Image (cartoon, rainbow, N blue to C red):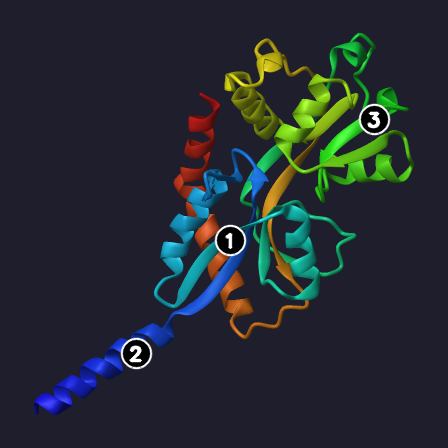
Amino acid sequence: MRKLIFCFAVWHFFGSALAAEKVVLEMDNDYAPYSYVENGELKGLYVDLLKSIAARLAPAYDVQLQAIPWKRGLYNLEAGKSLAVLPAYRNKDRSYIQVYSTPIYRETVVIFCNDDVMRKTLTQFPDDFSGLTVGVNLGFTLGEKMVAAAKKKVFSIVEAKGNEENLMKLQNKTIDCYANDRLAAQYSAEQLRKNARLPQFKDFKLREAAVISAEDTVIAYSLANTASYKADVIAKMDAALEAAKKSGVIDKMVAALSR
């Protein structure tokens, strides 16, 4: 009898362990305040949200979040080395993405410019920005208007690793303007102002020139990745995201950051 009980306990333990399918979601490591690494730890609004959603998918799925440079995340997605990456914007030119999740949050993409450029009349995007140098984060797509203007070479696009690097370029006038989500740029600018090792940012003002677009952030799923559980994970993730939005938890997180 003891032997039977022991065998059942062992079977139950290993059966439970095997039941949880490991699912890795790659997340941008340099997109504060949404998804970033600080002191070796992945943090941010979307990180907190996905952790809460991961709990909803357990015990069927063991959802793990992995920080990655955005450009490498896109490469892994295209090569099928990863299942998904976030936060992404929809991009019809990325044929290696099979499907996008239900929207997570709508970001407002704006363009900020340095003092010299702001002396000009800048109201109409992209026409009023002709001939300028515009910084963007490496591998980022900032909506159809931005993509169309870049293809027409209305202005020059210069990529940098992340928010802070682009803001440093904007401050020292290496670039004329910087395009990104409003909250992300404002948050990173505030962190730079607080940094005693960067006195040049003490009185730095982030000057918004124009709104480019409003973009839904989503999870991008790989076409080349053929995990057997992919369809089920996508469906469960979408349901959990919708529930989170209806509960108001995302709006509360954003409001807390904006204070």
Left or right of residue 165, residue 116 in this image: right
Between discs 2 and 3, the one toward the N terminus: 2
Between discs 2 and 1, the one toward the N terminus: 2
Q: In the rendered view, would you say 252 is above or below 227?
A: above
Dot 3 alpha-carbon crowd within 10 angstroms: few under 14, some 14 to 19, many 20 or more: some
Number of numbered discs visible in the structure rendering = 3
Left or right of residue 246, residue 227 in this image: right
- Residue annotated with mark 3: 133
Q: Is mark 2 on a helix, strand or loop?
A: helix
Where is residue 196 shown, x and y percent of the image?
Answer: 51, 16
Which quadrant of the view contains residue 205?
Answer: top right
Q: Is mark 3 on a helix, strand or loop?
A: strand
Where is residue 224 shown, x and y percent of the image?
Answer: 68, 68
- Residue annotated with mark 1: 66
Residue displayed at 80% across by 7% down: 119
Where is residue 32 shown, x and y percent of the image?
Answer: 54, 34
Q: What residue type is labelled 3?
A: Thr
Residue displayed at 60% across by 34% down: 107
Residue 213: which disc? none
- Discs 1, 3 touching: Cβ within 8 Å: no
- Residue annotated with mark 2: 14
Q: What element carries label 1?
A: strand
Q: What residue type is labelled 2?
A: Phe
Left or right of residue 182, residue 113 in this image: right
Residue displayed at 74% across by 10% down: 115
Between discs 1 and 3, the one toward the N terminus: 1
Residue 215 showing in the rendered view = yes
Which quadrant of the view contains residue 123?
Answer: top right
Is the N terminus in the top left, top right, bottom left or bottom right quadrant?
Answer: bottom left
Q: Distance between the residues labelled 2 and 1?
A: 26 Å
Q: What residue type is labelled 1?
A: Gln
Is the C terminus in the top left, top right, bottom left or bottom right quadrant?
Answer: top left
